[in-house]
């Protein structure tokens, strides 16, 4: 996949295309900040960065309505931001504060915002696929044309729930998108060592549904594939499997001294195919973006992140006794 | 009063609730025919044999405003869904800061007695009691199962209905009019003054039979049926033990780190209850083995009324100089 194969910009309003760039940049800057603050000891536990894969979350979510639902993985910040989550509450959650999305009970791996149809990041590989398939069933039973999207990695595509859910969704014609973010590694194990076939999308044939491979660093390719799948889902045609070939730039988790088994030249080659730089160039070519506009966008994003960090730092930690709250709902 | 079987009472509870609330739907690998007839195949869904998917789909549908029921049928089939039960259903409300509720009923039959060997004769509720975020019950009568299922369907949490396979065809009085049984409330099935027997499901009936037999000797046995496992009614158990001073716990599961151990701890860690104990606590449980097939072996493994009687006699002897309360 070379740059020359990049999809032409679809006939989308300039504002929508600029919004795609803004969301991708927001994901990247959010994670750069989260990683710095993690290494500084202000964010705890574990943080998995999505940098390099931004075109997948933003491309798919740009094809969705607010009422559509998605579920994410352990690498979830990108999906939250792409679906429109609030940066303040996200950052406060990473900081373990009361004002976070999960009141400090979840952290990086469990951010959810049901109000915007973001059914949560999930710490278990393949753990979310069945849950969001239930959201797809709910959408079908509601009968309002809603769709549900399962984001998962190449690793999850080898787990049972992937196969169980594709079969049920295909059999029941659920309005689902199964979006495989194939970043070529399940934690530190290469997909080539664990997959019988090179393309996860080929597995769609076993369930009689469309399966397509797209360049996951090409946001317009992702968007158009998602759009077709959404149309099919909304019109009662059932689920689709979209495999987005992409790459994460950073190690599996942010941890000082964390070993990265990947070949440095491979990482550098993928950085040369930066999905954000590609979109930026396409926007410039269409005359939709100039230096001043890009600088303004960058400044606004960094300002919003400063505000999010300030909000988090000013927010109280939970009270110790709140550990006992919300085990059960009233 | 009319009589229904335990199994009929459970289905009647589901049907009544489904009539009341259109958000309730039912998924099972083997759909219950009367429910399909009344509510149609959209609301009573026959599914592939994929318990992990069903268990998780219920979570997603619940988070979107539905009230799903997943019938695992036998508890043994839910073990392939343990990630969805333990990592997802139990934790998701808490982990997401309580932002939405997940009202789900999971149904599973438990217990032995059917000569179906180890994989189909299990009572593993204690494993689930150990997981924060799940409510669960194990009723002993048609009246209780109907009332508890109705309450569980209306509850805003994942609730597991453990249902005794031995009791499915057992009949009992069930009123025609609407009623519920609260979660977390034990029922004293027989009042007595010498010994408390805390028993579950089929063993409630065995304990009642034991009590009847011992009554002829002048021994007065109180039978406490917790009905709900989580939340467990500590007050009723402690109150009964404080009254009788002796405790026997009868459980069809093995003893290790189990329901019976929890009840023993409830009695002994409470100073007021401990102070009234006249004898060590006695557990009458299954042997800690996989359940074997041959009748001779299976009968040997499970406790019954005879072993409950032996347990009661043991605690009556164990009370230093109070060999008999009679």
Image (spheres, grey):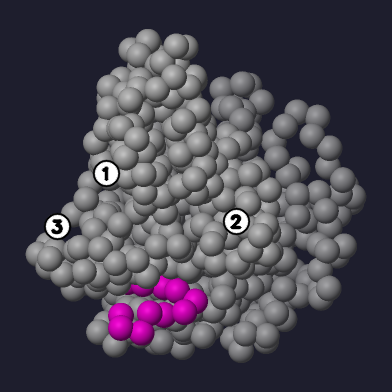
Q: Residues within 10 Å of mark 3 (few under 14, many from 20)?
A: some
Q: Position of residue A61 (x, y in %)?
A: 47, 64
Of the image marks 3 and 2, the number of the one nearer the N terminus = 3
Which secondary structure lies at badge 2?
helix
Q: Residue at x 79, y 34 (%)?
A: A258
Give the alpha-carbon distance from disc 3 to disc 2, as whole Å: 37 Å
Q: Residue at x 49, y 76 (%)?
A: B29
In the figure, is residue B149 to the left or right of B71? left
Give the alpha-carbon distance from disc 2 to disc 1, as whole Å: 25 Å
Q: Residues within 10 Å of mark 2 (few under 14, many from 20)?
A: some
Q: Which mark is residue B179?
A: 3
Q: Position of residue A217 (x, y in %)?
A: 67, 63
Return the chain for callout 1.
Answer: B
Depth check: give the residue in front, B54 or A205: B54
Which residue does the numbered mark 1 point to in the structure image? B189
Is A243 contained in the magenta span? no
Which residue does the numbered mark 2 point to in the structure image? B299
Depth check: give the residue in front, B76 or B44: B76
Depth check: give the residue in front, B172 or A28: B172
User: Which residues make up the magenta segment?
Assistant: B25-35
Residue lying furthest front in this view? B217
Which secondary structure lies at badge 1?
strand
């Amino acid at each position: 996949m070379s740059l020359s194969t990049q999809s032409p910009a679809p006939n989308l309003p300039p504002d929508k295309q600029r919004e795609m760039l803004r969301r991708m940049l927001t994901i990247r800057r959010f994670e750069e900040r989260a990683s710095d603050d993690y290494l500084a000891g202000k964010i705890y536990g574990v943080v998995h960065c999505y940098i390099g894969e931004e075109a997948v979350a933003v491309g798919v979510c740009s094809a969705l309505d607010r009422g559509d639902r998605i579920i994410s993985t352990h690498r979830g910040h990108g999906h939250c931001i792409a679906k429109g989550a609030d940066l303040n509450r996200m950052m406060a959650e990473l900081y373990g504060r009361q004002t976070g999305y999960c009141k400090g009970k979840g952290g990086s791996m469990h951010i959810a915002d049901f109000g915007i149809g973001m059914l949560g990041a999930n710490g278990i590989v393949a753990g979310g696929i069945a849950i969001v398939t239930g959201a797809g069933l709910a959408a079908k039973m509601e009968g309002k044309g809603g769709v549900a999207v399962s984001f998962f990695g190449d690793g999850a595509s080898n787990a049972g729930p992937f196969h169980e859910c594709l079969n049920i969704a295909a059999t029941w014609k659920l309005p689902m998108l199964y979006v495989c973010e194939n970043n070529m590694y399940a934690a530190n194990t290469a997909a080539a060592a664990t997959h019988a076939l090179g393309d996860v999308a080929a597995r769609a044939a076993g369930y009689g549904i469309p399966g397509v491979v797209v360049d996951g660093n090409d946001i317009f390719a992702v968007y158009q594939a998602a759009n077709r799948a959404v149309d099919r889902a909304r019109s009662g045609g059932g689920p689709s499997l979209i495999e987005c070939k992409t790459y994460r730039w950073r190690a599996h988790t942010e941890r000082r001294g964390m070993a990265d088994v990947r070949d440095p030249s491979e990482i550098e080659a993928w950085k040369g195919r930066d999905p954000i730089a590609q979109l930026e160039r396409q926007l410039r070519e269409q005359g939709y973006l100039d230096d001043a506009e890009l600088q303004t966008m960058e400044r606004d994003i960094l300002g919003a992140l400063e505000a999010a960090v300030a909000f988090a730092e000013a927010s109280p930690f939970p009270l110790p006794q709140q550990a006992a709250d919300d085990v059960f709902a009233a | 009063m009319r009589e229904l079987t335990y199994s009929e009472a459970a289905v009647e509870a589901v049907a009544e609730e489904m009539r009341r609330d259109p958000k309730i739907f039912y998924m099972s690998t083997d759909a219950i025919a009367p429910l399909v007839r009344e509510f149609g195949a959209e609301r009573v869904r026959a599914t592939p044999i994929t318990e992990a998917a069903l268990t998780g789909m219920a979570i997603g549908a619940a988070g979107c405003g539905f009230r799903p029921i997943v019938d695992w049928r036998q508890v043994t089939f839910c073990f392939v869904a343990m990630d969805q039960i333990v990592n997802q259903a139990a934790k998701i409300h808490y982990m997401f800061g309580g932002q939405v509720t997940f009202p789900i009923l999971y149904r599973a039959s438990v217990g032995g007695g059917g000569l179906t060997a180890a994989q189909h004769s299990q009572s593993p509720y204690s494993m689930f009691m150990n997981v924060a975020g799940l409510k669960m019950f194990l009723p002993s009568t048609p009246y209780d199962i109907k009332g508890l299922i109705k309450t569980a369907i209306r509850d805003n949490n994942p609730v597991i209905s453990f249902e005794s396979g031995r009791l499915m065809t057992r009949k009992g009085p069930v009123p025609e009019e609407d009623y519920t049984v609260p979660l977390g409330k034990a029922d004293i099935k027989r009042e007595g003054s010498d010994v408390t027997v805390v028993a579950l499901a089929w063993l409630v009936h065995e304990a009642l039979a034991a009590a009847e037999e011992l009554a002829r000797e002048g021994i007065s046995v109180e039978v406490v049926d917790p009905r709900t496992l989580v939340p467990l009614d500590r007050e009723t158990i402690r109150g009964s033990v404080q009254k009788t001073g002796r405790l026997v716990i009868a459980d069809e599961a093995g003893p290790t780190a189990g329901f019976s151990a929890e009840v023993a701890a409830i009695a002994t860690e409470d100073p007021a209850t401990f102070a009234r104990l006249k004898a060590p606590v006695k557990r009458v449980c299954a042997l800690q083995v996989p359940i074997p097939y041959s009748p001779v072996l299976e009968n040997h493994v499970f406790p019954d009324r005879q072993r409950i009687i032996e347990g009661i006699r043991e605690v009556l002897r164990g009370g230093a100089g109070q060999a008999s309360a009679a």
